[in-house]
Amino acid sequence: MDKEVLQVPGPTPIPEKVLQAMGSNLMYHRGEEFGRILKETLNLLRKVFGTEGDVFILSSSGRGAMEAVLVNAFSPGDKVLVLVNGRFGDIFSEIAESFDLRVETLKFPWGSPVDVWQVEDRVRKDSEIKGVLCIHCETSTGVINDIKAVGDITARYNILSVIDAVSSAGGIDLRMDEWNLDFVLTGSQKALMTPPGLGIVAVSQRGWEAVKKSSHHRFYWDLRRYKEFQDKQLTQTPFTSPVSLICGLREALRIMEEEGFDAVIKRHAAVAWEFRKNVREIGLEMFPQKDEWSSNTMSAVKCPSDIDSSIIVREMLENYHIRIASGLGELKNRVVRIGHMGTQAQSNHMRTVALALSEVLHTVKGN
Ligand SMILES: Cc1ncc(COP(=O)(O)O)c(C=O)c1O
């Protein structure tokens, strides 16, 4: 089989320049040259997150960053409110529970965004809630949540906002400081066009106060250690750095900077809009019930009720070498999930994907 085109909602294909940057000979993670690279990477990441505050790079996937944030932001027994409108909301609850947080969930139908009025109502009525956990782009449903409104509520009630931006950061507007967000996390493998393996965490000033107070046991994920090493004359990570991945991430961020971070966001919006239009033209429906609820980094597309999504996934791969993903959790066989972030977010390319999808649908229906 020819090389497959990675059209899943992460990991996404890696630009040639990023591959080259990772392929150069290894350098010492405590040396001056790597210190400069790390510093530049962190400064570029600040632009992605929309923050002047601290950003840390961890050796982990997205879930490692979710865990890191929870053990630093809260203490065992703290009550948190998790907003759940898809599988990744559930995952956030599971991680919080495993660290002995008292987890309250506010559930919303899959396909709809979080209802911020209900969030405010719950937070107003329960003064024990210490923080609200929310997924920005719910990768299981393709829905985007209003994290600006979440940040507004948590700031007014003086509690913490914790945002999972794994499948949004770098592809969708994110203004951590302006929106009063306290902890925002992401991974390297999606809109940031770098292989899996880096968890990235940004912390607000208010977030820092919480990190200092947390009584959770933590060693590898202790953000105080990261800050201590980062604030040194020579920027470093506390443990051996994933040097090659960070060199790759710097290159990816440089590519984004050259295009302009705002231009990148706009490109994602334009490509997503056109893709949604193409999906409707071929007779399919988006899973999110309204266009304004749809993410610009990935789409969950409903399969016709008589077709199992795994058949479409298989046909796309076998006949077009395009790798898309099936549904997760309760959407397992009902939707296909298609990424359009990072290098995937190109109009012509996405038109080809839509065309292949239409051909596959035709074939499958014909059988
Ligand atoms: C929104 C969201 N959160 C968390 C994760 C988990 O990340 P990882 O699989 O890198 O641990 C993903 C992965 O797809 C995701 O899309």
Image: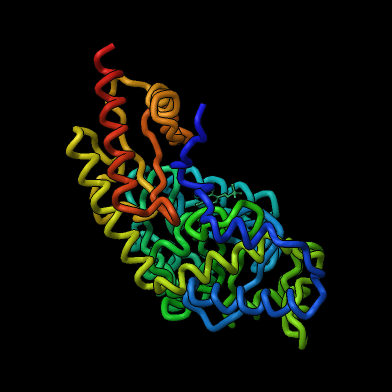
* Residue 32, quarter of picture: bottom right
Q: Residue at x 32, y 21 (%)?
A: 307
Q: Residue at x 51, y 54 (%)?
A: 190
Regarding residue 354, the answer to whether it shows in the image is yes
Q: Nearer the viewer, residue 107 or 31?
A: 31
Q: Nearer the viewer, residue 196 or 284?
A: 196
**Where residue 198 sits in the image (x, y, percent)?**
65, 58
Q: Residue at x 43, y 70 (%)?
A: 174
Regarding residue 217, the answer to whether it shows in the image is no
Count of picture labels:
0
Q: Nearer the viewer, residue 3 or 351?
A: 3
Does 327 sit above or below residue 254? above
Q: Nearer the viewer, residue 53 or 84?
A: 53
**Where residue 292 sits in the image (x, y, percent)?**
25, 56
* Residue 327, quarter of picture: top left
**Where residue 232 sits in the image (x, y, percent)?**
77, 85
Seen from this angle, which residue lies furthest top?
367
Image side of residue 25 versus residue 80, left or right: right
**Where residue 79 sits in the image (x, y, percent)?**
59, 61
Applied colour scheme: rainbow
Does 2 sit above or below residue 24? above
Q: Residue at x 29, y 52 (%)?
A: 347
Does 66 sit above or below residue 299? below
Q: Quadrant of the C terminus?
A: top left
